[in-house]
Every structure is written in structure tokens, then in C-alpha cells.
Amino acid sequence: MTVHQPDPRYTLSKRSKANFVLALRISLGFLAALWIIFIVDAVLGLRLGRFGLQPGSLPGLVGLFTAPLLHGSAGHLFSNSLPLLISLTAVLFLYPNSALRAIPIIWLGSGVFAWLIGRPSFHYGASGLIYGLLAYAFVSGVIRRDMRSVAVSLMVWFLYGTMIWGVLPIRPHMSWELHLGGAIMGVLMAFVFRNWDRPPLVRYDWEDDETVPDWYPESSADRPSSGKLDD
């Protein structure tokens, strides 16, 4: 029996694998920081929630920077942990160059949106960032025809299907404003950076089509080797 081996020109390189490990480590480090902040706040009674985003308030603008770092309860942070880990790792790995610009814009932009239209209370949590990352990954994948990005986004939406309703004002104690702001910013950034980070062509054993994208180098020598409103 003949076993088909993938063409080495189309397989992920060691560098790509190293980039994935780096993206995962950064995401795990950020997630660990969120848990440390929550635990220190709970143990010392610092009441860091007061540094959340407060719409319409000039002092509340500090929440543009701090809101994604704060969570109201362990359950709130726990529910955000896995989606954040997956979405942040995916964006950092799939779109490393544009991610360095898109993520800060999504972070701040979701807060600005919520500050402008939000209810007069404290808004905090990483869900706004998560919605932005998922929207960015999904729309970027569709625009660039990068099925890896689309698959990751659909997997998260499938596992956390109720998240789609988070952009609607249907739960009084949920910051749908941050969710909607994050999703809008993610879509906008996907279009702004649509020409960045062209996806490498990856070939698997089960694929037979030899077609490559129009932009791909014709010469094989040029091809790569691979109250409080929680959101």
C-alpha cells in the first residue's frame, strides 16, 4: 500500500511551530496575569472594580485601559478564560504582524464605544476583547480565504454559541456595549489590515488540488517551506 506523503513545500515549518508555541505562551501569560489580578484583589480587598469603565464620566475613562483586566467574580473570569486563550493564541499565530496593531485598537476601541453609548455604571471584563478577537479572526479568514482562521472562530462560537447574543441588550447585568464595541472594532480591523500577514499555503495528505493562489510565487524556489456590568 502506498502512503501519500505531504509535499514539504506545503507543510508547516519548524518556524511556524515555534511561532505557535510563542503565541500560546503569550496568551497563557496574559491569562495568568488576569487571574493574579483577580486573586490579589479578592485577598486584599482592593475593590479594583472601581477602576472599570464608567460611560459618560471623565474619571471613568481610565477604564479604557483597565476594564479588560478586571472581573467581578471567579465564575466571570473562568467563563472568559478558555475563549480568551483560544482567540488570542489564534490571532497572534495567524496574523502576528497585524495583531500587534489590531489588538491594542480593539482593546481601546471597544471601551470608547461603550463609554459613548453605555449605561451609567461600571463596565469591566475581557469579553469585549474576546468578541473583537473572534470577529477579527473570522472576518480576516473570510476576506483572505484563510480557512484556518475561520475554523478557529467557528469552533469557539460552536463551543460558546450563546456568546452571539452577547451583543444584544437582553441581560441587565451584562455589558453588551463592550461586546458590541469589540465585535465592531474586530470587523473594522480585519478590513484595515486585510493585506497584512498573507497566510502560508499548507497542504495535507487528503488534498489533491494543485491550485495555488494567484499571488503565490510561480517559481518553486520562491515558495516558503511551509451596578456593575460584567462583560
Image (cartoon, rainbow, N blue to C red):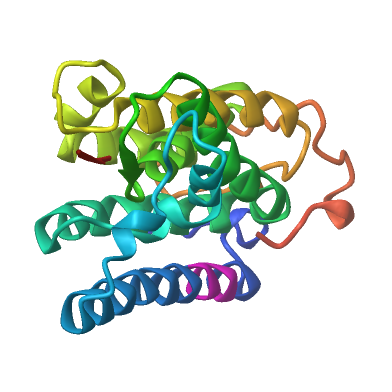
76 horizontally vs 225: left or right: left
13 horizontally vs 67: left or right: right
Q: Is residue 22 magenta?
A: yes
The answer to whether residue 139 is visible is no
Quick check: 202 above or below 140?
A: below
Front residue of 52 and 178: 52
Quarter where residue 3 is shown: bottom left
Quarter where residue 226 is shown: bottom right
Front residue of 101 and 40: 40
Quick check: 105 above or below 220?
A: above
Q: What range is drawn magenta here?
A: 18-23
Q: Residue at x 17, y 30 (%)?
A: 161
Task: Please provide percent x and percent y for residue 61.
Answer: 55, 44
Quarter where residue 211 is shown: top right
Q: Is residue 12 magenta?
A: no
Front residue of 192 and 65: 65
Task: Please provide percent x and percent y for residue 208.
Answer: 49, 35
Q: Residue at x 41, y 53 (%)?
A: 68
Quick check: 104 above or below 25?
A: above
Quadrant of the drawing holding the N terminus: bottom left
Front residue of 190 and 110: 110
